[in-house]
Image (cartoon, rainbow, N blue to C red):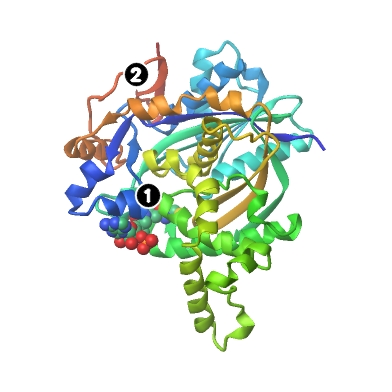
């Protein structure tokens, strides 16, 4: 079967930074360790006054097209995934195409454009749609542009305020890709849940503690569903496991559950039995509560074993680095986890070509999806072309009062003018409102 997957990927972070330990924690009267250790976050990215989901998405896409030498006619589909859309009718993909048409001679008049919504999993769903379109043979030799772009803002003083972020990921999906091939096997865990939602409101209603339980339950279902088509997973099968990362602490919880599941009835469980016993089995307990308590006790011991710590350090930790410096990018989050893993491989000379990753996406509301990806020989060149580290380092470090102004500036219910903190350079910028309340954009040389 034809290999289809991600040929290239570019990332665009919001240009401002809020340092959680230095700036956020003191204002909240919290120990910085709550953020850096508990949540696993050092900083959040924010958009400058002239940035929004369109500029970040268009800038990531422009960088990608320039680097790969693509013209509009090479692109047969533009799908944007977002949960920060500002229009219930006109999709963000049309705005992004309009931006790109300002700088290319051709146009996207024959590209199918859309917008996907299912909280943070919509980026992966758009990727999936693009892969299916190519596998169905409907692409006429063209590739698909998938853009995941979000400004993840919470109401001031909401518990989620610590897990904000802003940025975009652009991916080009083709046959014979340079970065990763996607497996056709995939598993779903999906149920009607109310853990996080935005019923016609900009800032989410979140039950943060519940969202942890729902995330873990849906991930577990998705893994079982994936295994029903791919066969049982073993920890050694995957070099990295990028998860949707609303904050790294969530992934820490999911990782130990996943490991416990994967080692069940394997030589690893047997080898660990001397230290921590074997895993509790439901049939050995009179009640569900007693069984669940035994599982929690087993996992507490499991996460302190050397076997688990080594696996976590090699397979999970490397996926969290970018996220820990930029915060939650909602639809882009699992995709920066993948990028983080690939970058780690390049920096540490891990020979990843031909090896597999397991990619675990999640969206509140709620659905998890799991598929495998095979890393392609061109991955190193692709990773080296990314300038994400320079972008992260170049962000303007906000003071507390500046952060408050930026939050107000991007609050749809306020209309606050704000002098930018940074200077746009060869990029798309928000340029005010048109007569039908549409947003306008220009390219600044
Ligand atoms: N040092 C180290 N760790 C600390 C600490 C310290 N000084 N203080 C607290 N912590 C730990 C806590 O033990 C906790 O870890 P645990 O969950 O492993 O026990 C973690 O830091 C967070 O502390 P907590 O008191 O639970 O924080 P909170 O009540 O402010 O809420 C969230 C945290 C994540 C629930 C909240 O930020 C939120 O709702 N975020 C949005 C979640 C979201 O986006 N969900 C949907 C997408 S999947």
Does dot 1 land on a helix, a strand or a loop?
loop
The image quadrant where one finds ligand 1 is bottom left
Q: Residue at x 51, y 31 (%)?
A: 347
Would residue 134 be found to the left or right of residue 37 on screen? right
The residue carrying mark 2 is 424
On screen, residue 14 above or below 400: above
From the top left corner, tell me how far across and down residue 193 is, in percent.
50, 64
From the top left corner, tell me how far across and down residue 221 is, in percent.
61, 63
Mark 1 or 2, closer to the camera: 1
The residue carrying mark 1 is 40
Quick one: quadrant of the N terminus? top right
Q: Residue at x 29, y 41 (%)?
A: 411
From the top left corner, tell me how far across and down residue 246 is, in percent.
43, 49
- Distance from disc 1 to disc 2, alpha carbons, whole Å, reads 30 Å
Whether residue 5 is visible here, answered yes or no, is yes
Whether residue 365 is visible here, answered yes or no, is no
From the top left corner, tell me how far across and down residue 427 is, in percent.
42, 18
């Amino acid at each position: 079967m034809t290999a289809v997957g991600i040929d290239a990927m570019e990332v665009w972070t919001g240009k401002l930074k809020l340092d959680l330990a230095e700036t956020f924690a003191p204002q909240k009267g919290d120990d910085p360790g709550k953020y850096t250790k508990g949540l696993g976050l050092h900083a959040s990215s924010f958009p400058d006054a002239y940035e929004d989901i369109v500029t970040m998405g268009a800038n990531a896409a422009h960088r990608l097209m320039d680097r790969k030498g693509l013209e509009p006619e090479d692109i047969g589909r533009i799908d944007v995934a977002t949960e920060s859309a500002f229009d219930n009718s006109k999709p963000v993909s049309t705005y992004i195409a309009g931006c790109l048409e300002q700088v290319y001679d051709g146009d996207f008049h024959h590209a199918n454009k859309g917008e996907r919504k299912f909280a943070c999993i919509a980026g992966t769903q758009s990727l999936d749609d693009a892969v299916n379109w190519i596998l169905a043979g409907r692409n006429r030799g063209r590739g698909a542009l998938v853009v995941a772009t979000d400004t993840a803002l919470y109401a001031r003083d909401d518990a989620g305020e610590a897990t904000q972020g802003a940025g975009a990921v652009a991916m080009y999906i083709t046959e014979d890709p340079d970065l990763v091939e996607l497996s056709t096997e995939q598993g779903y865990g999906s149920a009607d849940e109310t853990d996080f939602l935005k019923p016609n409101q900009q800032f989410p209603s979140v039950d943060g503690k519940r969202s942890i339980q729902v995330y873990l339950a849906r991930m577990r279902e998705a893994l079982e569903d994936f295994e029903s088509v791919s066969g049982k997973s073993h920890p050694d099968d995957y070099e990295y496991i990028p998860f949707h990362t609303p904050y790294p602490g969530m992934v820490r919880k999911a990782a130990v559950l996943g490991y416990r599941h994967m080692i069940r009835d394997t030589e690893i469980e047997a080898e660990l039995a001397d230290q921590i016993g074997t895993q509790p089995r439901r049939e050995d307990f009179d009640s569900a509560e007693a069984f669940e308590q035994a599982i929690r006790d087993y996992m507490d011991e499991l996460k302190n074993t050397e076997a688990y710590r080594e696996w976590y350090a090699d397979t999970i930790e490397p996926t969290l680095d970018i996220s820990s410096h930029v915060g939650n990018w909602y639809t882009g989050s699992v995709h920066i986890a993948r990028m983080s893993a690939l970058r780690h491989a390049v920096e540490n000379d891990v020979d990843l070509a031909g090896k597999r990753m397991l990619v675990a996406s999640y969206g509140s509301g709620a659905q998890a999806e799991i598929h495998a990806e095979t890393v392609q020989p061109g991955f190193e060149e692709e990773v080296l072309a990314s300038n994400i580290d320079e972008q992260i380092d170049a962000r303007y470090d906000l003071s507390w009062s500046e952060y408050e102004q930026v939050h107000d500036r991007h609050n749809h219910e306020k209309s606050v003018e704000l002098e930018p903190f940074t200077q746009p350079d060869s990029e798309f910028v928000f340029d005010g409102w048109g007569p039908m309340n549409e947003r306008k954009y220009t390219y600044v040389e």
